[in-house]
């Protein structure tokens, strides 16, 4: 069971909708991440794949963006109005980092 009090929340409004991120950080790395929001993304399991790919990635804008872009390409992700950069903005907001 997830204890949500251990997670930081970040919000970012993209052209495609609101992205909400719940982030659990440990020693400067992403320990766990959960994506929600009111945007569209295909295929349906894209958010789970992205979350698994980000596990143990440093909370660093460039490393996160590189990881997300690789997932987009590998999984042929389509997210109308929402870009990898938008996800990075939401993640960095959750991490308390300015970009």
Image (spheres, rainbow, N blue to C red):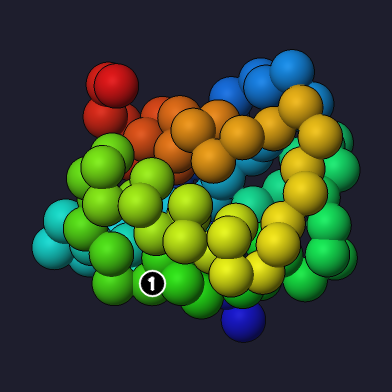
Q: Residue at x 85, y 65 (%)?
A: 44
Q: Residue at x 72, y 57 (%)?
A: 77
Q: Residue at x 26, y 52 (%)?
A: 63
Q: Which residue is mark 1?
A: 55
Q: Is residue 84 above or below residue 41?
A: above
The one nearer the camera, 93 or 40, is 40
Residue 51 spot, x, y in % from top left: 54, 66
Mark 1 crowdedness (10 Å alpha carbons): few <14, some 14-19, many ≥20:
some
Q: Is residue 81 above or below residue 67?
A: above
Visible residue check, residue 17: no
Where is the C terminus found, in terms of image quarters?
top left
Question: Would you identify the image quadrant in which residue 86 lies?
Answer: top right
Where is the N terminus found, in terms of image quarters?
bottom right
Visible residue check, residue 65: yes
Residue 16 spot, x, y in % from top left: 79, 26
The one nearer the camera, 95 or 8, is 95
Query: Going by the picture, which residue comes out furthest to the bottom?
Result: 1
Residue 2 spot, x, y in % from top left: 58, 73
Left or right: 53 as drawn, with respect to 49: left
The one nearer the camera, 1 or 23, is 23
Question: Would you identify the image quadrant in which residue 26 lies?
Answer: bottom left
Q: Is residue 81 above or below residue 50?
A: above
Q: Residue at x 58, y 70 (%)?
A: 74
Q: Total number of numbered labels?
A: 1
Left or right: 94 as drawn, with respect to 73: left
Query: Going by the picture, which residue comes out furthest to the left?
Result: 27
Left or right: 2 as drawn, with respect to 78: left
Residue 18 spot, x, y in % from top left: 73, 28
What secondary structure is marked by label 1? loop
Left or right: 94 as drawn, with respect to 43: left
């Amino acid at each position: 069971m997830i204890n949500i009090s251990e997670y930081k929340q970040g919000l970012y409004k993209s052209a495609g909708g609101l992205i909400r991120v719940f982030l659990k950080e440990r020693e400067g790395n992403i320990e766990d991440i959960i994506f929600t929001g009111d945007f569209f993304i295909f295929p349906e399991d894209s958010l789970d794949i992205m979350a698994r790919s980000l596990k143990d990635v440093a909370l660093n804008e460039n490393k996160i963006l590189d990881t997300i872009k690789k997932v987009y390409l590998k999984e042929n992700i389509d997210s109308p109005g929402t870009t990898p950069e938008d996800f990075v903005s939401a993640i960095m907001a959750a991490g308390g980092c300015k970009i």
